[in-house]
């Protein structure tokens, strides 16, 4: 789980109580998206997306392929123009104020394409200079830590090395917000860990990060909160602990009496009987107590319980038929009420 | 050996699928040029014969003297063989330029299905399948053979339908098709040598330019230079006079040798790599790169330099025969009398040719300006606009930097053209005459280039998908310039071509209005395109 020393909660509290003007200017969300819509011809890429990122946090931005993560980030970078919705980036309009905003933001696109004839070093200098600035000391440090040869031409870099060029250009600058679209795709595990270290250092300096990723270990180790989207809509947002709490626990049990009766208990799903006395199943967390009592009555001989892994958590949200749980994808009412309840929980922390 | 060609059939289908629009458009365009020539010349000659009360053949014979003795026409079109026959006249009017256009079609066809595919990494996907090392070359060659065969057959049918001997018609069709295949085969070699599609295509285009220039000088000076040019070989066949068959053998041999070299080179290199290695670059950027203009200049400078070299080459080629044109006419008593009756002196002939070649070079330079103007589209398609626009860089600054280069390229190209013509002429005559006049005449054609490129900017501002429509504007301009008079287009249609309004003579000052209007159109389209670009999605 992520370290807990970050001031996220405090800031939310400040806003919650809406005290003093100085504090409220600090607590203004870095990214504030409400009901964002964007269509490409007949295709609805974003269909009422919500996203809120507070200062100093790493927001994990998750969703299946094609769910609209990159589109959202490109709207934030003023590359795409929104059709409808409220979008504020550092308190300003990402389309109208793009040029000014970009001095304070570093962006790593999902597909890093380099100029074939420019060396990596030239590209870093160029993107740094045209972007959020370039600190020469940090540039040298980053090139060293990411183990990058800056003299190679763009066309000769491998996928991972192209990614490193974009990362060095972004991380060697003076940005206060990092918008990173699957930044570690193609990096080896060693570089992945370097990336995580560097992001943590940025956080210690009070920077904010919006990170889209499919690497769950990375999300788990870096992100304070996550937002999960599907089909251009937000289906879940909250801390990982909350998301876990809202879902299921996997149970494996061996009982003295035949275990079959448990299948009918409320909150039990995915019931699989290995034999008369042994079964595995998941239990909705709010039914955990009653299911445990029922198990106890059958005489527990052995019991293993596991919190849902991140994989299971995301599979639930990514899969087309999300079985029960907190979000029902196809009914927008259901999912938005789930968000509402989460928002209340976050605010109440 | 068969495994070396495994999967050729599937690749063939892939190429036909990918090229279902571009290649047919090219073929339609080329065939249109070939079909319209007999139709229009026949009609014009018949009308003339009726007014004069003589046979069409007599008219043809009259014109043969005039056309054949015009050095300018010979330099542009080819050797004046069998001009007193309809077939000979058609072949002459279709001319060396059409051979070059067919060459261009072949170079681009080969380029986009070989090196461009490797460059993008798509070829790697294909080669990972059960596909032989030579399959890609074989597949694209089959398409090239088919495309050139279409041209040959259409020519045969069009000329036969006009009443010409089918055998001779086919011989001319074969000349066109084989010449195209020579350029296709040469391109196959270059794409093995260069790692970069742009470089390979550029080298192949240079081969076409050199082939064209060799025969232009050779045909005017009759010094045998034409025998070093594939276009020269094809035109030496002379199908409507006394046909020669040796050029067919030379053409086929050239195709076979080039194809063989390409096949051999494929196995000597890695997929995606060229034979020319890439050197490492600097670890840090120089200050001059660190701006939108610096980047645009870095990305465009090589291409722009090559255009300058090509234009200088073309200017020097024509400049070196400028003097010849004059003496060509003066040597012929009868010709001079005819021209003097028409009020033309030797100087007027020289000026007329100069005007023609400057307009011709302006047309070619227009393609260069358009290519420069299309660079931002290429950057956007490759996903390289996004990281730059994610910096504190306005849309106007990014696009403006590229377009500034396109705007500046036009006068630079024309100055290079004027200089190269004047200097080459000076080198022959021992004296550079009226340099200012020539440069001025070259420069006034600049606004026409801006206006054509401006259409592209406007389309690009609208949506990147429409941008290539600018080539349609270019094709119309080229067609009107090259064939407008020949096919007797009405004035209104002729006036569509911006080049037509700035055909100034050295020292002439007519058409100030045209210059102002064309500049205004250029300005408005560039500004409008940029304004629209700031409002649309990128990527």
Image: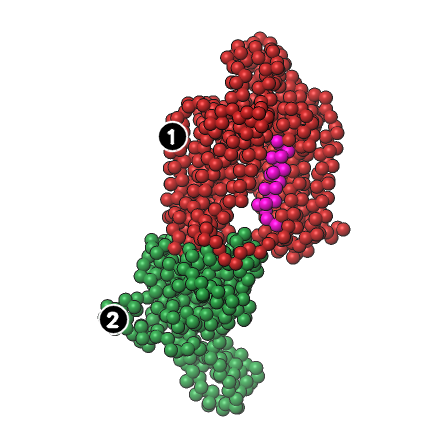
Chain colours: A green, B red
* A18 horizontally vs A266: left or right: left
Which residue lies under the disc numbered 2?
A18
Q: Residues within 10 Å of mark 2 (few under 14, many from 20)?
A: few
- In the depicted structure, whether residue A66 falls above or below residue B275: below
Q: Residue furthest left?
A: A20
Q: Magenta stretch mostly in which secondary structure?
A: helix
Disc nearest the viewer among 1 and 2: 1
Which type of secondary structure does the marked residue at label 1 adopt? helix
Q: Residues within 10 Å of mark 1 (few under 14, many from 20)?
A: few
Q: Residue A143: x and y, percent?
A: 50, 65
Q: Residue B405: x and y, percent?
A: 45, 42
Residue B251 showing in the rendered view = yes
Q: Residue at x 48, y 74 (%)?
A: A310
Given the image, what chain letter belongs to the residue carrying mark 1? B
Mark 1 and mark 2: Cα distance apart in space? 63 Å
Q: Residue at x 49, y 83 (%)?
A: A305
What's the magenta region?
A: B195-213
Q: Residue furthest front?
A: B430
Q: Which mark is residue B337?
A: none
Residue A150 in magenta stretch: no
Q: Residue B78: x and y, percent?
A: 63, 25
* A99 horizontally vs B336: left or right: left
Given the image, what chain letter belongs to the residue carrying mark 2? A
Q: Nearer the viewer, residue B15 or A117?
A: A117
Q: Residue B65: x and y, percent?
A: 62, 15
Q: Which mark is residue B516?
A: 1
Which type of secondary structure does the marked residue at label 2 adopt? loop
Q: Nearer the viewer, residue B39 or B172?
A: B172
Residue B13 showing in the rendered view = no
């Amino acid at each position: 789980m992520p370290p807990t020393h970050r001031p996220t909660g405090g800031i939310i509290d400040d806003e919650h109580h809406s005290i003093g003007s100085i504090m409220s200017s600090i607590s203004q969300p870095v990214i504030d998206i409400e009901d964002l819509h964007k269509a490409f011809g007949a295709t609805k890429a974003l269909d009422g997306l919500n996203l809120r990122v507070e200062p100093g946090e790493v927001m994990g931005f998750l969703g299946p392929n094609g769910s609209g993560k990159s589109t959202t980030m490109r709207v934030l970078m003023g590359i795409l123009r929104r059709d409808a919705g409220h979008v504020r980036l550092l308190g300003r309009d990402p389309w109208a104020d793009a040029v000014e905003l970009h001095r304070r933001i570093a962006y790593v696109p999902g597909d890093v394409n380099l100029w074939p004839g420019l060396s990596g070093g030239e590209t870093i200098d160029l993107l740094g200079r045209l972007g959020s600035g370039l600190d020469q000391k940090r540039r040298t440090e980053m090139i060293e830590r990411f183990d990058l040869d800056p003299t190679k031409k763009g066309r000769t870099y491998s996928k991972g090395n192209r990614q490193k060029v974009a990362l060095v250009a972004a991380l060697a600058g003076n940005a206060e917000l990092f918008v990173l679209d699957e930044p570690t795709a193609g990096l080896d595990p060693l570089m992945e860990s370097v990336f995580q270290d560097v992001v943590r250092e940025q956080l210690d300096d009070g920077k904010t990060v919006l990170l889209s990723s499919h690497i769950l270990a990375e999300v788990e180790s870096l992100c304070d909160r996550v937002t999960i989207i599907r089909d251009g809509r937000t289906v879940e947002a909250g801390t990982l602990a909350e998301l876990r709490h809202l879902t299921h626990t996997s149970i494996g049990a061996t009982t003295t009496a035949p275990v079959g009766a448990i299948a009918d208990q409320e909150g039990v799903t995915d019931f699989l009987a290995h034999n008369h006395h042994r079964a595995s199943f998941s239990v909705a967390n709010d039914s955990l107590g009653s299911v445990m009592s029922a198990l106890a009555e059958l005489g527990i001989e052995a019991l293993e319980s596991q919190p849902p892994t991140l994989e299971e958590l995301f599979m639930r949200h990514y899969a087309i038929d999300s079985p029960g749980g907190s979000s029902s994808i196809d009914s927008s009412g259901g999912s938005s009420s789930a968000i509402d309840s989460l928002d209340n929980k976050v605010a109440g922390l | 050996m068969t495994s070396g060609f495994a999967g050729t059939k599937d690749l063939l289908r892939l190429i036909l699928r990918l090229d279902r629009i571009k290649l047919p458009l090219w073929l339609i365009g080329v065939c249109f040029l070939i079909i319209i020539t007999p139709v229009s010349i026949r009609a014009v000659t018949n009308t003339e014969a009726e007014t004069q009360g003589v046979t069409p053949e007599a008219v043809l014979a009259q014109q043969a003297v005039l056309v054949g003795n015009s050095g300018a026409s010979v330099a542009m079109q080819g050797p004046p063989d069998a001009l007193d026959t309809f077939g000979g006249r058609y072949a002459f009017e279709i001319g060396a330029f059409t051979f070059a256009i067919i060459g261009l079609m072949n170079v681009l066809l080969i380029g986009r299905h070989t090196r461009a595919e490797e460059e993008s990494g798509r070829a790697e996907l294909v080669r990972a399948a059960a596909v032989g090392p030579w399959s890609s070359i074989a597949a694209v060659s089959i398409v090239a053979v088919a495309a050139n065969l279409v041209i040959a057959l259409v020519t045969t049918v069009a000329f036969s339908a006009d009443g010409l001997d089918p055998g001779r018609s086919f011989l001319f069709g074969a000349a066109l098709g084989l010449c195209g295949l020579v350029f296709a085969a040469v391109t196959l070699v270059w794409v093995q040598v260069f790692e970069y599609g742009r470089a390979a295509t550029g080298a192949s285009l240079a081969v076409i330019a050199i082939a064209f220039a060799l025969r232009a000088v050779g045909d005017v000076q009759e010094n045998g230079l034409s025998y070093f040019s594939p276009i020269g070989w094809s035109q030496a066949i002379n199908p409507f006079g006394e046909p020669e068959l040796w050029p067919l053998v030379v053409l086929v041999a050239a195709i076979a040798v080039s194809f063989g070299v390409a096949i051999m080179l494929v196995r000597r290199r890695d997929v995606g790599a060229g034979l020319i290695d890439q050197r490492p670059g600097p670890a840090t950027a120089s200050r001059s790169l660190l701006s939108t203009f610096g980047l645009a200049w870095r990305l465009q400078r090589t291409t722009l330099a090559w255009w300058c070299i090509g234009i200088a080459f073309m200017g020097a080629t024509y400049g070196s025969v400028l003097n010849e044109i004059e003496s060509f006419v003066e040597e012929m008593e009868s010709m001079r009398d005819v021209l003097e009756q028409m009020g033309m002196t030797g100087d007027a002939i020289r000026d007329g040719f100069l005007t023609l070649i400057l307009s011709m070079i302006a047309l070619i330079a227009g393609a260069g300006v358009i290519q420069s103007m299309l660079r931002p589209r290429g950057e956007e398609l490759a996903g390289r606009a996004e990281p730059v626009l994610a910096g504190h860089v306005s849309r106007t600054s990014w696009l403006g930097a590229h377009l500034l280069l396109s705007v500046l390229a036009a006068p630079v190209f024309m100055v290079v053209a004027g200089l190269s013509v004047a200097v080459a002429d000076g080198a022959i005559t021992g004296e550079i005459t009226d340099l200012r006049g020539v440069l001025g005449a070259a420069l006034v054609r600049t606004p026409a280039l801006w206006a054509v490129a401006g259409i592209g900017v406007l389309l690009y501002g609208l949506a990147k998908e429409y941008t290539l429509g600018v080539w349609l504007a270019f094709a119309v301009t080229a067609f009107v310039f090259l064939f407008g008079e020949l096919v007797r287009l009405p004035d209104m249609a002729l006036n569509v071509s911006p080049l037509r309004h700035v055909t100034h003579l050295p020292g002439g000052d007519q058409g100030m209005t045209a210059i102002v209007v064309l500049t205004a159109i250029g300005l408005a389209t560039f500004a409008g395109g940029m304004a629209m670009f700031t409002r649309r999605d990128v990527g």
